[in-house]
Image: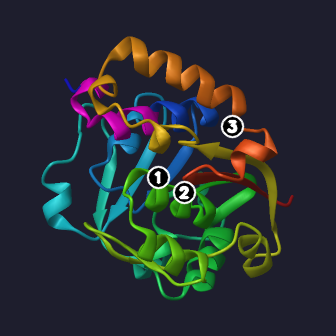
Amino acid sequence: MHNITELPAWERLFKRILWEQLGDIQGKRILDFGSGECVTADHFARDNEVTAIEPSEDILSARWADNDYKVIVGDASSLERFKDASFDIIFCHNVLEYIEDKAAVVNEFERILKPGGMLSVVKHNRTGRVMQMAVLLDDFDKANAILDGKNSRASRYGEIKYYEDMEISIWATELDLMKSYGIRTFWDLQQNQEKHADEEWQKKMMQLEMRVSELEEYRRIAFFHHLIFEKSI
């Protein structure tokens, strides 16, 4: 049985904040698109029917599987197999940045989501990324490049192709933005990394992160944005 404390400190806090923002979900049909090691898919599979899509078999070889859920090895083309209005909830967490035709994928989400259903998108926030480069990584060249509108790179997944929060509702007009949260507002500014894995410190940091996650002035500088959309009825 996996425990969240097995995750790297940054990911542990990230998942805790994300799951808290998603709230208690039970009895729903969920699609986790770009599921990675299926940590979130496995978490919600305790009380829901979950399907996870992930293109990397290497990543899936280390997936969490304490609960039953369906796994599809595939990419955006795998969405075509689902009928209209197939899912109550779709997760797309840190995925769209690495896709060229984002609009096509979001349109597929709109098609396979039930009316009144929820789309949860986590995305990199350009402003937060500039803060990270300037403060945490001390890389002024990259900070300036991102500030100038250029993309950046993630060591594991390649080029991060930034997009704006509002674009999703432009690509799919039936998806209405209902909630907008920040994730990791303060984490990347805390330089004492020895504290990061301490559970008591994590608890206090999460409480503070949750307190400011919906306050616009703090959300604006968060490293990630968590957007929750509802499909029009």
Give the residue at the far top of this rendering. Answer: 200
Q: x, y percentage for residue 93?
A: 49, 56
- The residue located at (38%, 37%) in the rendering is 191
- The residue located at (39%, 59%) in the rendering is 138
Prevailing SS of the magenta stretch: helix
Q: x, y percentage for residue 159?
A: 38, 79
In the image: residue 149, left or right of residue 78: right
Badge 1 marks a residue whose secondary structure is helix
> Which amino acid type is marked by label 3?
Ser
How far separated are the C-alphas under marks 1 and 3?
Answer: 20 Å
The dot on residue 213 is: 3
> Which amino acid type is marked by label 2?
Met
Q: Quadrant of the N terminus?
A: top left
Question: What residue does disc 2 label?
Answer: 131
Question: What residue does disc 1 label?
Answer: 135
In the image: residue 82, left or right of residue 217: left
**Cβ–Cβ below 8 Å for labels 1 and 2?**
yes
Q: Nearer the viewer, residue 114 or 59?
A: 59
Q: Is 136 one of the magenta-colored residues? A: no
Q: x, y percentage for residue 73?
A: 26, 68
Q: Nearer the viewer, residue 50 or 12?
A: 12
Badge 3 marks a residue whose secondary structure is loop
In magenta, the rendered stretch is 3-15
